[in-house]
Amino acid sequence: MSVSLRSIVAVLLLAFALAGVPLAAKADAVTDGLAGLADRSFSRKVEAVTQLGASGDKRAEIILNALLDGRLYVRNADGAVVIGEERGQAFLAADPVLGGEAAEAPLADFTKITVNNRMRGAIRGALGALTLFSVDGATRAAAADAVFKTPSADMLPLLEKALARETDAGVKRRMERARAAVAAVGAGEVAERLAAIQILGDFADPDVRSLLGGLAAGDGEVARAAGLTLRRLDESLVLWGAAGNVFQGVSLGSVLLLAAVGLAITFGVMGVINMAHGELVMLGAYTTFVVQEAFRTHLPGAFDHSLFVAVPAAFLVSGLVGIALERGVIRFLYGRPLETLLATWGISLVLQQLVRSVFGPTNREVGSPSWMSGAYETASGLVLTYNRIAIIVFSLLVIGAIALVLRRTSLGLSMRAVTQNRRMAGAMGIRTGRVDALTFGLGSGIAGVAGVALSQIDNVSPNLGQAYIIDSFMVVVFGGVGNLWGTLVGAFTLGIVNKFLEPYAGAVLGKIFVLVAIILFIQKRPRGLFAPKGRAVEA
């Protein structure tokens, strides 16, 4: 990051003014650290960086940032350290301690202070110590993590002071972890180090495991205690790893559920093998893109609410396309599944090319609202992203809404009547053709809603639907054709099984194993987990 020299000087002067103390009173720690940075030995430079980080002085933060950016030089004549900036042929140098106007000087009179990887780690740790008192909680948490990664006994006083002031429970826990790391690797009493190792055992995350692994490689009582804690930590990590896989599996299952639930209606209830279902999902994703573009152009301040408009818009677009598809093609092919399959496959190619012609073949950018950005990270390193959590909740709401429509509305009653006995339903005055069109429209509209959700975690491209069509059919067949409860159980089961297989077999081989398992399963239970209720059974 390039910062102008005048800005640096201004920040320095402001820092002095805010401190409200004479410059000379706080200059010692900083000037001593600067002198160490001019040394040729990297070990001495690391000590100087640590000294600057432990000073708590705001000028040290500016100096360390300049060092990290390669803007710190040594004047050859007297060994003084300056912050320098090249401007064309000119070189401006300023005193990082006393401030003042930057003076122009020949670049040949100065030598840049070099850093290595060890120093970079120490600089980041020192910068972390200096930002432990930031007003922003995320910055303080990041500062505690930086101190944890480069623990040094010199930073302990600052850490203790920050801990005493900290009120946020999450940040405080990060600081306690950093303090335990500093005490465990420090040169203090053995009893203090053993107590710190005991505390580190409560933090089941990979970073702590790495730290304890280093301590356990040594000799003595500390190494033995670290080894015992490491074994206990490994057991906890296995449990947290399983919890992470379950979350990822439920997340994947919710995506499969959204993609498959519309298919469960059109395929399960109506007996139509709709190979264009994935393209209806794709239309929902592109509708989200169009809605967001409208918000970006006309209502940029309300962008966070764009998804609340995109969901009904995608339902309408995909639903209307589905009704047109059923009225225009599929109603002439009822009872001829192979011809329906071929016809809908051809329509899927037409829809892909249509979207490719209108929007282009490249991916389209769909943004996430601020309330779906970020993640919740537990102290044990389990990361729960907000967009995945939102999709899990959304998928459950969608399937709940579908269940209400099927069981509590006249459309749902008509759908169930036509499904169970078409001729009897027609004799009772139900317009079966109209019910067919609305049922297909409902399944297609849900596919569009699935596209809105998928646009938040996947690339929006003409091939979006193809990636989910096979999985959707697997979910419907495994769960039981035409059964919503079976679709729910099937989607989450396949999602979790996939996530547990992937670490051992890889994504592709894992999916093949699942496919083979489903084929074997339907040999024993041809109707899936739950008995089907649909026109196919009736036939």
Image (cartoon, rainbow, N blue to C red):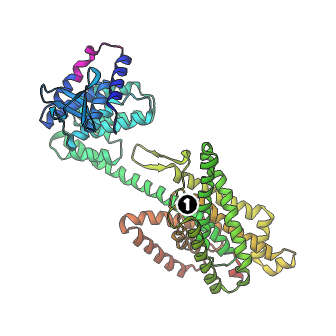
Residue lying at the far front of the rendered structure: 89
Name which residue lies at 50% across and 79% down: 519
- 230 and 72: which one is in front? 72
The image shows residue 380 at horizontal and vertical percentages of 39, 46
Which residue carries the number 1 mark? 454
- 422 and 1: which one is in front? 1
Write down the quadrant of residue 160 in the picture: top left
Of helix, strand and loop, which one carries label 1? helix
Q: Is residue 202 left or right of residue 488?
A: left
Q: Say if 113 sits above or below 252 in the image.
A: above
In this orientation, does residue 190 appear? Answer: no
Q: Is residue 525 left or right of residue 505?
A: right
The amino acid beneath tag 1 is Leu
Q: Which residues are magenta?
A: 20-30
Q: Is residue 462 left or right of residue 70?
A: right
- 464 and 481: which one is in front? 464
The image shows residue 462 at horizontal and vertical percentages of 54, 68
Name which residue lies at 44% across and 49% down: 383
The image shows residue 520 at horizontal and vertical percentages of 49, 79
Name which residue lies at 44% across and 75% down: 512
140 inside magenta stretch? no
Q: Is residue 181 left or right of residue 163?
A: left
The image shows residue 414 at horizontal and vertical percentages of 79, 70
- 143 and 415: which one is in front? 143
Image quadrant containing the N terminus: top left
In this orientation, does residue 340 appear? Answer: yes
Q: Say if 319 sits above or below 366 in the image.
A: below
